[in-house]
Amino acid sequence: MAIYSLGAVANLNPTLTFHASSVELRITNTTAAPLTPIVVKVYNSNGATPTGATEVLYFTTTFAIGAPNGVVTLNIPTVVPSYAITVSSPAAAGFVSDISIYAQGRDAAGNLVADQVFPFGDWNFVTTA
């Protein structure tokens, strides 16, 4: 299973309001094969909490993308000081390009948060388990 991570995303303005109240996450199947399971986990990240604090899982979902070039779009709440997202796909060892991932933060009015746009190249490949 291939695992990708966005890492910790700071989500507080200097006024202690949230940059983004949600993130739109788009996952595309880039193969001809059905992909199952795709697992998405979102954490309240320790990137904005005291050193040694643990991440707390607050959103998770599992789904399949059956069609070639099929797309699933999720809208995930991000009303936390810092969040981290991981996405895993069923890629076999050595094969990590079965999905493409894109995320963008949205403010409370639904507007794009310019500093929270994350194309596939911004995602860290963690491992193939």
Image (tube, rainbow, N blue to C red):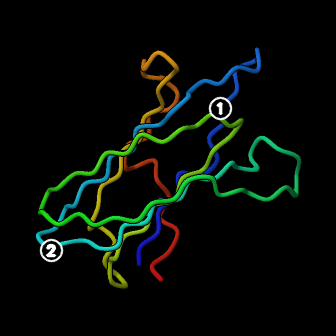
Residue at the disc numbered 1:
11
Q: Position of residue 112 (x, y in %)?
A: 42, 22
Q: Position of residue 54 (x, y in %)?
A: 79, 59
Query: Looking at the picture, does residue 78 appear above or below residue 33?
Result: above
Q: Residue at x 23, y 63 (%)?
A: 65
Q: Residue at x 48, y 42 (%)?
A: 76
For the N terminus, give its image quadrant.
Answer: bottom left
Is residue 53 left or right of 69 when viewed as pictured?
Answer: right
Q: Residue at x 62, y 52 (%)?
A: 58
Q: Earlier in the sequence, mark 1 or mark 2?
A: 1
Task: Estimate how packed mark 1 is, as few (under 14), some (14 to 19) or many (20 or more) residues with alpha carbons within 10 Å.
Answer: many
The kind of residue tagged 2 is Ala
- Numbered tag placed on residue 33 in the rendering: 2
Q: Position of residue 127 (x, y in %)?
A: 50, 75
Q: Residue at x 37, y 45 (%)?
A: 74
Gap between marks 1 and 2, in whole Å? Answer: 36 Å
